[in-house]
Amino acid sequence: MRRLMLTAMNSGSGKTTVTCALLAALRRRGVSVQSFKCGPDYIDPMFHTQVLGIPSRNLDLFLQGPEGVRRTLACQRADLALLEGAMGFYDGVGGTAESSAWQTADTEDIPSVLVLRPAGSSLTLAAQVRGLQSFRSPSHLAGLLLNSCKPAFHSHLAPILERETGLPVLGFLPPIDEAVFGSRHLGLLTAGEIADLSARIEVLAAQLERTVDIRSLLALAGDVSNSAPPPVPLPPVRCRIAAARDEAFCFFYEDNLDALRQCGAELVFFSPLRDRELPSNTDGLYLAGGYPELHARALSRNEAMRESIRCAVTAGLPTVAECGGFLYLQQTLEDDAGTSWPMAGALAGAGFQTGRLQRFGYLTLTADSDSLLLRRGETVPAHEFHYWDCTENGTALAARKAGRETVWRCGFASPTLYAAFPHLHFNSQLPLARRFADRAARWREEHI
C-alpha cells in the first residue's frame, strides 16, 4: 500500500478540485484508491465520497492525537491512500505547525505534492516554494502541480520551478468553468447541493489525464511499511441510535459512526426535514451539525418531528447534539433572511445570525461533573466553526481556545445529554462512543 498527500501554500489554491479530479482519474484507470482529509473539515470529504462512492475520513492530530490518526489510516484497504491537506501546508494550531498538514505528513512520513495557483509571479513563486522546503526538515515535499494555469504559462514556469527548487512539476490543470464550485460562509457548497457535480468531476478528470503525468505522480507515493490489520467484526447490537442525516444535518465524521457501531450501536438514519417522527425503538439520538439555518422554515413546518424530538430529549433519551443539532433543539432559529422559526424546543434558547465566525477553531472542553460523554475533570479536544449563535449557550463545560488562556462556559451536559456548539471526534483518547452506546443500551433495558 502507498500514501500521498496533496497540499498547498494557502486556502483557495484548489486542493479539493485537484484532489477530486485525481481521484476520478485514478478510478477511471482502475486504481484502488481511498481518500482522507487533514483537519476537521466536513465538506471536502463529501466531495471525495461523491467521487469514489466510499466514505472519506478525516485525519486530525488535535482532535485524535497521533494514535487516533494511525487508527484511522489503518482503515486503508486500497492500494493508494490520497490525502488532502488543510489550509496552508504549515498552518496549524495558534500560529504553529502543530496539527498542520505538514505535521500529519511528518507523523506518518507521507510524501506531499504542492498544488500551486500561479498568479502574477514566476521566479518569486520558486522562492516561496524554496521557503516551504527549508522551513521544516524534512519538508516531505516531493513534487509540484500547477492549478488554474494556462498551457503557455505552464511551459514557461515549469522549467523555472524545477531548476530553482529541484522538485518535478508534474503537470497542470488549466482554468475551466467546471472547476468553479459555489461557496458560502463555511466554504464550498456541499457536494449534494451541486446538481451536476459528477459531470463536472468527469470533465476535470479527463483534463487532468491530458495535462498531468499521473504515472510520475503515483511514483512519488510512499510505501506503507506495515500491512493493515484485518477489519474488526462488529459486536452484537445492543442499542439503536437514531442519527439525523439529510440536507440540514450532514456534518459527520465517518470515524464517529464506526466507533458507535463498534460499541454495539445500530445506526438508524432519519430526516428531520421529511420524516414525521423518530424511528421506532430508538434508544439514543445523534443530531450532528450542518445547515439547519438554511432549512429553518421546512424544519419548523415539520411539527410532528419537532414534537417527537422534544418529547424524547426531555424524557431523557440519550442525546448528542452538536452545532447545527444544538441549534435545532432551541426554542427558535433565525434563518439567513432574519426570520425566526420555532424549533424542537427541548432547550431554552434562540438561535440567531451574527454575520461573522463565532469562537472559530480548536478548543478544549473540561467537565465540571459527570455526564453522558464526560466525567468530572476530564478534558476533551473539540472544534467550532459557525456563523450563528444562541441566547442560551449553557454553562456545563469550561471551554478554552487552543493556545490561549481565555476560558468561557458553554454547553448543556447531563447523564443523558451533550448539547453544545463544539464538535467532538469519537476516535480520540476518551471512550466517548462507548459511553454514548452504554447509556443508550441502559435506556433500552429500562424501557423494554
Image: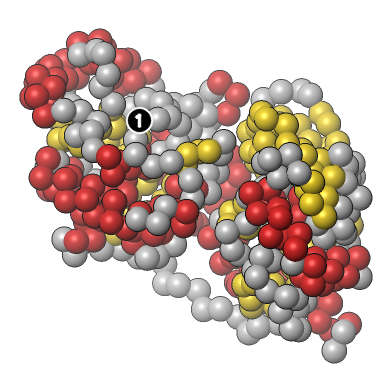
As drawn, is 194 to the left or to the right of 243?
Answer: left
Front in this rendered view, residue 38 or 224:
38
Q: Which residue is drawn at 45% across and 36% down?
A: 86
Give left or right: position of 120 versus 425: left
* In this picture, residue 234 sits left or right of residue 197: right
- Asked if residue 214 shows in the view, the reply is no
Q: Which residue is drawn at 9% across and 19% down?
A: 156
Q: How is the image coloured?
A: secondary structure
Quarter of the image with the C terminus in it: bottom right
Q: In this view, does 403 lie above or below 183?
A: above
Q: Which of 372 and 349 is in front in this view?
A: 349
Image position, residue 10 (x, y; %)? 41, 26
Position of residue 377 relative to residue 46, above or below, is above
- Residue at the spot 84% in from the left edge and 69% down from the top edge: 307
Q: Is mark 1 on a helix, strand or loop?
A: loop
Q: Where is residue 157 in the image (x, y as percent from the top left)?
A: 14, 20
- Asked whether the viewer can see residue 262, the reply is yes
Q: How many numbered marks does the figure carry?
A: 1
Q: Name the residue under label 1.
A: 13
Q: Position of residue 445 (x, y in %)?
A: 84, 84
10 Å crowding of disc 1: few (<14), some (14-19), many (20+) = many
For residue 216, side relative to residue 282 (left or right): left
Q: In which quarter of the image is residue 318?
A: bottom right
The image position of residue 147, as x and y in percent, is 25, 32
Residue at left offset 13%, top offset 26%: 154
Q: Label 1 amino acid?
A: Ser
Q: Look at the picture and state if 217 lies above or below 233.
A: above
Q: Quadrant of the N terminus?
A: bottom left
Question: Of residues 365 and 177, which is closer to you in this image?
Answer: 177
